[in-house]
């Protein structure tokens, strides 16, 4: 298994995926700095404003689109190199190979989350006053990463089955569905809404980017264990089903 993980990690070396992993969080933090500097209303503290902007746009955009793009790039690279076809001629466990692909992609998004934490803290230390909400930033990033990992097997299967463009289209549809459903009672039925919904009690921001007032029902922390439970079940089910599909499919 370790050899499969190393092989999958090497495939992404010197690719756009590596640049996306580090570049995307920097873009969101720079965007948050610019927006905060242009905000006429200074009633919100700089740290709070940074968290509201970063942890609203990060789960709304990067989780659906970034995950879909990373999966699409992985599949496009496999088809171009023919590596998958050659691997199938060797005594390699295909379900384990699928698990390795998923794990490496989860590792990429984990690195993105780490870059997001570091860049958010650095930006806040440069432009904000007061103590840094270190653990809130760590916690919010970790929650988004853990919930977004549940989407990887689905997007990876769609990219391998129907092509990278369809995976991106699914990510785009998931982005809109996630934003619209996050504040609604049926949010548990839409996996793309889970990270956005959980940012409400953790960071205090509405899915539409507006700070939540005290006492708002969306601030209830009861949704956090629900979101984690849904993500774990969804990941376990989709990982198992997509691994079976991958082992049985024919390579073209």
Image (cartoon, helix red, strand yellow):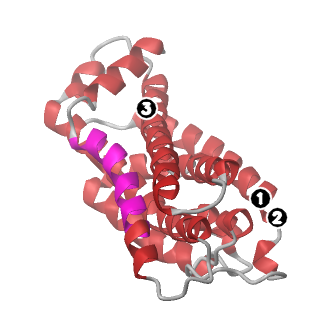
x and y percentages locating residue 107 in the rendered image: 47, 34
Q: Do callouts 3 and 2 mark residues in contact (Cβ within 8 Å)?
A: no
| Lower position in the chain sequence, tag 3 or tag 1 | 3
State the image quarter where residue 4 is shown: top left
Disc 3 element: helix
Separation of residues labelled 1 and 2 (CA atoms): 6 Å
Q: Nearer the viewer, residue 160 or 29?
A: 29
Mark 3 or mark 2, which is nearer to you?
Answer: 2
Q: Which residue is mark 2?
A: 221
Q: Residue at x 46, y 70 (%)?
A: 175
From the viewer's perspective, is the residue at label 3 or at label 1 nearer? 1
- By secondary structure, the bulk of the magenta-drawn segment is best described as helix
Q: CA distance from mark 3 to mark 2?
A: 31 Å
Is 65 or 152 nearer to us in this picture?
65
Across and down, in percent, residue 144 comes to: 59, 54
- Which label belongs to residue 104? 3
- Count residues near mark 1 (Cα–Cα under 10 Å), then give few for <14, some for 14-19, many for 20+: some
* Above or below for 24 versus 221: above
- The residue wearing badge 1 is 224
């Amino acid at each position: 298994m370790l050899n499969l993980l190393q092989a999958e990690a090497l495939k992404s070396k010197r690719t756009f995926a590596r640049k996306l992993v580090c570049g995307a969080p920097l873009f969101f933090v720079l965007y948050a700095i610019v927006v905060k500097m242009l905000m006429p209303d200074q009633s919100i503290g700089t740290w709070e404003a940074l968290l509201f902007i970063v942890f609203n746009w990060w789960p709304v955009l990067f989780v659906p689109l970034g995950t879909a793009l990373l999966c699409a790039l992985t599949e496009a690279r496999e088809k171009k190199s023919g590596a998958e076809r050659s691997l199938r001629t060797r005594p390699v466990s295909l379900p384990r190979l699928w698990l390795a692909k998923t794990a490496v992609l989860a590792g990429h998004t984990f690195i993105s989350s780490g870059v997001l934490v570091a860049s958010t803290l650095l930006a806040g230390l440069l432009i904000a006053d007061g103590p840094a909400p270190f653990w809130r930033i760590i916690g919010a990033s970790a929650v988004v990463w853990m919930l977004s990992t549940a989407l990887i097997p689905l997007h990876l299967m769609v990219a391998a089955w129907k092509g990278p463009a369809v995976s991106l289209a699914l990510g785009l549809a998931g982005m809109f569905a996630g934003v619209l459903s996050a504040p609604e009672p049926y949010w548990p039925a839409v996996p793309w809404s889970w990270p956005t919904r959980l940012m409400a009690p953790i960071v205090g921001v509405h899915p539409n980017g507006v700070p939540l007032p005290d006492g708002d029902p969306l601030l209830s922390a009861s949704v956090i264990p629900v979101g984690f439970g849904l993500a774990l079940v969804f990941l376990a089910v989709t990982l198992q089903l997509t691994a079976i599909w991958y082992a049985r499919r024919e390579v073209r």
